[in-house]
Amino acid sequence: MTELRVRGLVVRHRDSVAVDGVDVSLASGEQLVLLGSSGAGKTTLLHSLLGAGPRVQGDVSVGDLDPYDPTHRRTVRRNTGIILQGGDLVPRMRARTAAVSGCSHLFGRSGWWALARGHTPAPLRDRLTDLADRQGVTHLLDRRVSELSGGERQRIALVRALLGRPGLLLADEPTAGLDPARAAAAVEALLAHTRGAASTTLVVTTHDPAVAARFDRVLALREGRVVHDGPALSAGQVDELYARPVP
């Protein structure tokens, strides 16, 4: 499990401020959703937890480590599962290889030989079998990613993100491109897999209020600033969040 702390974070992209003085803390095992329209700063804030993005000022801590410190960055990223928009899987790879590729530090050359023969590296075999079974993708592991539907890719991406037992899981718009039923299932899978005795700290971005409503804690962003930190927003608060700024 991993605690998160962000204090006074300011991140700039060229001439604009993407994140403007954000403060947020998460306890180990807590689940948070970042809600806002496109350009609100959600993805930039999420990436800052990995030490990415041009930080101007402020502090970020993942556990006791600063992801912006080059001596800490690799440790932070190895302890973090990541699901990017669209699943971020290599189309020509077989799903099995795509699922385990993020854990290559856990197996050596023999593991790659096993993958070449269509087998899972021994150190990950039981874990992959369990996760693939829970996500209903066992029968897809030997297919190429290019042959999978959007929902199937998202489930493989979830398996990949959880395979190394991360203390922190970051998911950027994990329901993008999914129909409402599959979006709901994807969110429930994220929440279910990060609860329990070995719970994982979870941060998810979304522009969809219906997705955000499934979380106990919502951090709403507008123009890079936090405008709400608490339970799900009311209908009126959602309308205000997405209202166009007055010229």
Image (cartoon, rainbow, N blue to C red):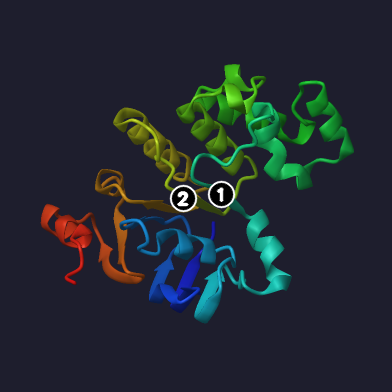
Image check: 219 left or right of 199? left
Residue at 71% of width from left, 62% of height from top? Answer: 74
- Quarter-wise, where is residue 156 in the image? top right
- 183 relative to 120 in the view: left or right: left
Q: Are marks 2 and 1 in contact (CB under 8 Å)?
A: yes
- Residue type at mark 2? Asp
What's the residue at 18%, 56% (across, down)? Answer: 238
What residue do we see at 57% from left, 42% from top?
Answer: 88
Question: What residue is drawn where x is 66% and y is 74%?
Answer: 69
Classify the position of the N terminus by image quarter: bottom right
- Badge 2 marks a residue whose secondary structure is strand
Q: Within the image, what quadrant is residue 99 found in?
A: top right
Q: How many marks?
A: 2
Residue closer to the observer: 22 or 30: 22
The numbered mark, 2 or 1, whose residue comes first in the sequence reads: 1
Judged from this view, the residue extending furthest toward the left is 236
Q: Few, some or many C-alpha atoms within 10 Å of disc 1 (few <14, some 14-19, many ≥20)?
A: many
Residue farthest front in this picture: 247
Along the viewing direction, whichever of 188 and 144 lies nearer the viewer = 144
Q: Position of residue 153 (x, y in %)?
A: 53, 31
Quadrant holding the C terminus? bottom left
Question: Looking at this rendering, what residue extends furthest in the bottom direction?
Answer: 57
Q: Is residue 5 above or below residue 173?
A: below
Res. 82 mark: 1
Which residue corresponds to mark 2? 172
Q: Secondary structure at mark 1?
A: strand
Looking at the rendered structure, the kind of residue marked 1 is: Ile
Q: CA distance from mark 2 to mark 1?
A: 8 Å
* Image x and y of residue 226, in percent: 31, 70
Classify mark 2: residues with Cα within 10 Å, few (<14), some (14-19) or many (20+).
many
